[in-house]
Amino acid sequence: MTPEVAAVAAELADMAAADHRATVQANSDDYAEQLAWRRLTARHADRLHELMDAYGWPTADLVGEDAARAAWLIAQHADRQLDVQRQALRLMEQAVAAGSASPRELAFLRDRTLVNEGRKQIYGTQIAGIQDGSPIPWPCEDPERMDDRRAEAGIPPFGEYVAQFSVS
């Protein structure tokens, strides 16, 4: 890894760490905290956009496993910047086709982008909320085949997935 790419990997890891620390702000009752979250994710998405323009999708082969996962997390949280999510999705699709990125992470990003576009998700990875202790997923295309698609992407069955969101 060149020093330049090592610096990119470290930057992606730092952004992911900041994201993890600030995630609690996303659903805070305090509007100032929500705004801080939005600003952070917007800054990170802007930077990811620049990095994708310069390097393509930050694959594990390029930046290492942790930084590649960090890039995916940043793209996932770019909810108010669909252009960045769409660019990441396009580049990640190419990387998955080349065997350089995770089909599982691509499935999550595809669903997230579809939901943000107001469309039905494919893999059932996006949960709209919790109602009466039960998770409420966003609508899903062809729900009868969802678990087959999930298995192809390396995601556990929907029932197992939503059980982790259930509040007793």
Image (tube, rainbow, N blue to C red):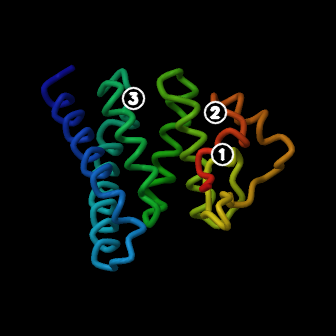
Q: What element carries label 3?
A: loop
Whether residue 156 sits left or right of residue 8 in the image: it is right
Say if mark 1 contacts mark 3, CB within 8 Å.
Answer: no
Question: Residue flagged by tag 3: what amino acid is it?
Answer: Thr
Instruction: Name the spot of residue 167 as percent of width and height, x first.
Output: 60, 56
User: Mark 3 or mark 1, which is nearer the start of the sequence?
Assistant: 3
Q: Nearer the viewer, residue 49 or 136?
A: 136
Q: How far apart are marks 2 and 3 (CA)?
A: 20 Å
Can you name the residue that lies furthest to the left here? 3
Task: Identify the residue at horizontal 61%, vertical 53% (top origin).
Answer: 126
Can you name the residue that lies furthest to the bottom here? 31
Question: Residue flagged by tag 2: what amino acid is it?
Answer: Ile
Whether residue 131 sits left or right of residue 116 in the image: it is right
Q: Tell me: residue 141, above or below residue 67.
A: below
Residue 59 numbered mark, or none: 3
The residue pinned by badge 2 equals 155
User: Mark 1 or mark 2, which is nearer the start of the sequence?
Assistant: 2
Q: Which of 84 and 152 is in front in this view?
A: 152
Mark 3 surroundings within 10 Å by alpha-carbon count, few (fewer than 14), some (14 through 19), many (20 or more): many
Task: Identify the residue at horizontal 25%, vertical 38% (top origin).
Answer: 13
Which of the two discs, 2 and 3, sits closer to the camera?
A: 2
Mark 1 surroundings within 10 Å by alpha-carbon count, few (fewer than 14), some (14 through 19), many (20 or more): few
Residue 163 numbered mark, or none: 1
Which of the two discs, 1 and 3, sits closer to the camera?
A: 1
| Picture quadrant of residue 58 | top left
Whether residue 161 sits left or right of residue 144 in the image: it is left
Q: Is mark 1 on a helix, strand or loop?
A: helix
Whether residue 141 sits left or right of residue 87 in the image: it is right
